[in-house]
Image (spheres, helix red, strand yellow):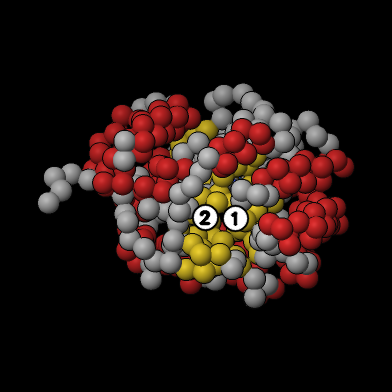
Amino acid sequence: MRIFTFADVYTFLKRILFLLDAEKAHNITFLFAGIAAKLGLIRLFGSSKKNPVNILGLNFKNSLGVAAGFDKNADYLTTWEQMGFGFVEVGTVTPKPQEGNPKPRLFRLPKNESLINRMGFNNKGLDFMVAKLKNYNGDLTIGCNIGKNKNTPNVLAFEDYLACFKGLYPYANYFTVNVSSPNTKDLRTLQKHEELTKILNPLLAYRHTVSQKMGKKPILVKLSPDMEKDEFKNSVKFLNELDIQGLVLTNTTIKRNILQVNGEKRGNENGGLSGKVLFEESNGWLRLAKQYMPNKTIIGVGGIDSAKRAKEKLECGADAIQIYSGLVFKGPKLVQDILKIMN
Ligand SMILES: Cc1cc2nc3c(=O)[nH]c(=O)nc-3n(C[C@H](O)[C@H](O)[C@H](O)COP(=O)(O)O)c2cc1C
């Protein structure tokens, strides 16, 4: 019989961690979690429940994933695996390493159990990620979320996406093209369908040339919850016609009117809002997308902080789900709770 669980440990540590700056707390948590994973300790407390599913023509251990941005450089794969996740979306990675925006750039909104971030694609670059994934031989399905460097103008953005796609092709199980972060200037204008064509066509052409040798790796596109409704519909309809395999919905929002509890000290920081308050908003876009893309895969992300909400997200039409902010507020018990209700 277990005396305490990993979740109990997190609840205790959370009290201390939440006294620290949010990014520092994240780094400290994962420094220790990484060591614990190396020693195999997380496996002792994590979930080993298997709920295999076939999504995107791939075998996933289960359909619960880590959302992009948590593991920007594929540094913590063993930790996720031992916690029980079925898949992780690493990145967003850019061709060259970059620092991201000045700190502080991550803020907790505890009353709303939400976060605001303006990280700005801080990452160690493509070569670093390739080296990490080359050495990984665990059972997580790996999605590579790709983006562009801050200094690359939008007209040349396609070169950055293609460089990441080519470099990671042998190691990724699927790709997500991120055109929806609010923290890289003008990135979200790439969601318009004319712009998407310029980015996706080179990826599709490259995939065509290598698929015989390395297989046809699924491509998803991650969209923002801040588009105009018509613009969103047009992009989804357009994407439905292409040989891409689906969507990730949604990224963070720049809206603030969805905050539910007033008096949040950091509520007016610039950046993308995620967490509990994003749930209904992201579900709305998910349901809408499903109407225009009924036969492709949609990964649902935004505001999942309980098993009940995980179920609701799946009922909205998601084939798989991801979590980020919920994990910060609820800790690893959330993973165990969600895995219990997956079949
Ligand atoms: C600190 C932070 C960094 C993020 N970085 C990325 C990123 O690099 N790429 C990306 O596609 N999404 C990124 N996201 C968005 C998440 O993947 C997810 O779409 C969003 O947080 C909504 O999920 P949640 O409510 O469960 O947090 C980030 C989110 C947070 C909180």
| Total count of labels | 2
Disc number placed over residue 189 in the picture, else none: none
The amino acid pointed to by label 1 is Asn
Q: Residue at x 67, y 28 (%)?
A: 98
Q: Amino acid at mark 2?
A: Thr
Question: Which residue is tagged 2?
Answer: 141
Crowd tier of the residue under label 1, counting other residues whose Cα lies within 10 Å: few below 14, some 14–19, many 20 or above: many
**Residue drawn 49% across and 47% down?**
137
Q: Is residue 164 left or right of residue 249?
A: right
Q: Is mark 2 within 8 Å of ligand 1?
A: no
Residue 93 appears anywhere in the view:
yes
Element at badge 2?
strand
Location of the C terminus by quadrant is: bottom left
17 to the left or right of 146: left
Of labels 2 and 1, earlier in sequence is 2
Q: Residues within 10 Å of mark 2 (few under 14, many from 20)?
A: many
Q: Are marks 2 and 1 in contact (CB under 8 Å)?
A: yes
Identify which residue, 209 or 128, lies in the foreground. Answer: 209
